[in-house]
Amino acid sequence: MRALIVEDEVHLARTLKDMLKTVHFDSDICFDGEAGLDYGLSNVYDLIVLDIMLPMRDGFEVANRLRKEHIDTPILMLTARTDIEDRVKGLDCGADYYLTKPFEMNELLACVRALTRRQGEVVMDALTLGDLSLNLSTCNLCCGERSVRLGKKEFSIMHILFSAGKSVVSKETLLNKVWGCDSDAEDNNVEVYISFLRKKLQYLKTTVRIVTLRKFGYKLEEAEE
């Protein structure tokens, strides 16, 4: 999963990135509201952590604009302000949760879990399709008694494919969500990792395969018996 952190305090932004990494989020960081809005409008994020006091555009304006553009990504708004009026304004602008600085790591992660559940993404230990399962805690891909541990990018790709269900995931989506919007990665990088994953599926002897839909992308599919 990928998060967008919009926070002008550089140290805090990097700390947030490290915190989210513990729950399998890769993060992109922006230090002003204008860049945060541009990144958010790409609609490739699973979570947006948004400060209120930002250069160029404040968090209220960013959240409001994203909602007007029908971006429904969960927004966790951060601020040092404690006024009730500011909390109400943040929620009215489209934030899903309001967290006051300073906060503890456990408090932040609890908010993230709550937002994840609220979006209908049930918190569970594993994702399953047919005889194949992806353990979200260990990053193992399992079929029967066989299992293989996935690397970071392999895990991210499989998580996206599992979560997509029968929908096709484009190469562009994989590039943005796994490598990040500012990455120099190209289509070939996706193809290489898809090849790695297919070899691991073959080793597991699963009936699930990664199907390529030419010019569209990839999806998981159970082989017909």
Image: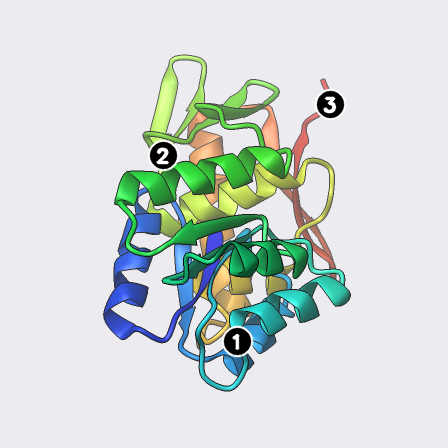
Mark 1 crowd level (few <14, some 14–19, many ≥20, 10 Å Cα): some
Task: Look at 45% across and 13% down and name the residue there.
Answer: 144
Task: Look at 45% across and 53% down and name the residue there.
Answer: 193
Q: Secondary structure at mark 2?
A: loop
Q: Are marks 2 and 1 in contact (CB under 8 Å)?
A: no
Whole-Å distance between the Cαs marked 2 and 1?
A: 37 Å
Sequence order check: which comes first, mark 2 or mark 1? Answer: 1
Q: Which amino acid type is marked by label 1?
A: Asp
Mark 2 crowd level (few <14, some 14–19, many ≥20, 10 Å Cα): many
> Relative to the observer, which residue lies in front, 82 or 184?
82
Q: Secondary structure at mark 1?
A: loop
| x then y, percent, for residue 117 | 56, 33
Whether 141 is drawn above or below 155: the answer is above
| x then y, percent, for residue 180 | 47, 66
Q: Which amino acid type is marked by label 2?
A: Cys
- Residue 145, located in which quarter of the rendered image? top left
| Residue labelled with disc 2 | 139
| x then y, percent, for residue 151 | 33, 45
For marks 3 and 2, give the one nearer the viewer. 2
Whole-Å distance between the Cαs marked 3 and 2?
A: 27 Å
What label does residue 149 carry, if any?
Answer: none
| Residue labelled with disc 3 | 224
What label does residue 58 carry, if any?
Answer: 1
> Relative to the observer, which residue lies in front, 150 or 156?
156
Sequence order check: which comes first, mark 3 or mark 2? Answer: 2
Task: Look at 41% across and 62% down and name the residue there.
Answer: 81
Sequence order check: which comes first, mark 1 or mark 3? Answer: 1
Q: Horizontally, is 9 left or right of 93 in the view?
A: left
Q: Are marks 3 and 2 in contact (CB under 8 Å)?
A: no
Whether 222 is drawn above or below 93: the answer is above
Q: Which amino acid type is marked by label 3?
A: Glu
